[in-house]
Image (tube, grey):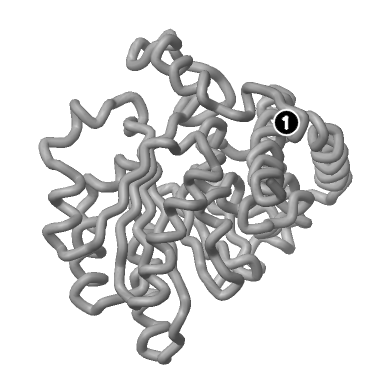
């Protein structure tokens, strides 16, 4: 019961943070485009529950949930989105390039699939340094599986037996295009052809189920020092980029999304979620206040931290 409370707390915290982003977005306080994780929170929370401080996660541009699930600080998060000097990257990165190395979040990129080889490279470096027992998570959407570097990374990680967890958050969409209209291949057959163990979970709305199931995958990577593929089905409630809904675009229907929402524990308030709602809301308000009152970058900041 204690673990369930913790998982639901974290999921609700991510949901409320992103709902605050939706509220703030029309005011122009937030200076960067946002790709929201609403609907996908359980994947990040459940998987990260199995990670240790020495493990690294390479997120993509829809990375708010993983950043928060890894314990990334909230005031600096909002400051970064608002382009303030107190932000994670002093306002230079925005939402799509979040990074918090102290929390094991090693940066995102707006380029699809681009952080997958970064995870593989980091895993290779750890192996060369004989750093055993670490897990390097490459987090990506199903659209990334069509990129050439995805295939190259699977091959290299398998060939060199690297401790990489290839984590596919499968919401079935690449912007507005479904997998059926994009992919002539079977993802399972593709992955297993490289010799990787393949895990597939359909209940990506349930953080407890995600935690339990992903534990097997994470521990196989850690114990065997070999790459593993984990695919988790999920659903993106909001538009590809931005705070709104986009059912008017015609590529998906509210009806099919409602089938997923009917299973979403955050949309069925419980004593647990209601207990935490006020606490989380107060934390969010304090973080937003910190960001709003923080200074904007100056001309002198332009080239700082640039190599």
The quarter of the displayed image where residue 225 is located: bottom left
The quarter of the displayed image where residue 259 is located: top left
Front residue of 304/31: it is 31
> Left or right of 266: which side holds 290?
right
* Residue appearing at x 43%, y 62% in the figure: 137
Residue carrying label 1: 20
Q: Position of residue 189 (x, y in %)?
A: 13, 49
Front residue of 79/250: it is 250
Image: 111 above or below 19 = below
Q: Position of residue 231 (x, y in %)?
A: 34, 47
**Can residue 172 be seen here?**
yes
**Can residue 297 be seen here?**
no
* Residue appearing at x 15%, y 63% in the figure: 194
> Left or right of 151: which side holds 124?
right
Q: Where is residue 216 in the image (x, y as percent from the top left)?
A: 40, 60
Image: 69 above or below 259 = below
Front residue of 298/20: it is 20
Q: What element carries label 1?
A: helix
């Amino acid at each position: 019961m204690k673990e369930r409370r913790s998982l639901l707390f974290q999921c609700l915290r991510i949901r409320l943070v992103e709902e605050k982003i939706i509220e703030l977005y029309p005011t122009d306080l937030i200076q960067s485009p946002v790709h929201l994780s609403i609907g996908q929170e359980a994947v990040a929370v459940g998987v990260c529950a199995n990670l240790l401080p020495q493990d690294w996660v390479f997120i993509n541009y829809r990375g708010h949930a993983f950043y928060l699930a890894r314990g990334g600080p909230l005031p600096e998060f909002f400051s970064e989105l608002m382009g303030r000097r107190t932000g994670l990257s002093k306002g230079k990165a925005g939402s799509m390039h979040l990074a918090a190395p102290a929390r094991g979040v090693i940066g995102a990129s707006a380029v699809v699939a681009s952080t997958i080889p970064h995870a593989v490279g980091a895993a290779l470096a750890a192996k060369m340094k004989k750093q055993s027992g670490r897990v390097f998570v490459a987090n990506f959407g199903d659209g990334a599986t069509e990129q050439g570097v995805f295939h190259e990374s699977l091959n290299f990680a398998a060939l060199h037996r690297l401790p990489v967890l290839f984590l596919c958050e499968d919401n079935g969409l690449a912007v507005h295009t479904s997998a059926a209209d994009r992919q002539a291949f079977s993802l399972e057959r593709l992955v297993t052809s490289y010799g990787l163990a393949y895990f597939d979970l359909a209940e990506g709305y349930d953080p407890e189920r995600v935690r339990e199931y992903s534990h097997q995958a994470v521990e196989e990577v850690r114990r065997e020092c070999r790459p593993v593929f984990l695919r988790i089905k999920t659903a993106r409630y909001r538009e590809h980029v931005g705070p709104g809904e986009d059912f008017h675009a015609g590529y998906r229907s509210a009806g099919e999304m409602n089938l997923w929402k009917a299973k979403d524990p955050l949309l069925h308030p419980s004593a647990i979620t209601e207990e935490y709602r006020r606490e989380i809301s107060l934390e969010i308000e304090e973080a937003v206040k910190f960001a709003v009152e923080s200074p904007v970058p100056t001309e002198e900041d332009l080239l700082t931290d640039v190599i």
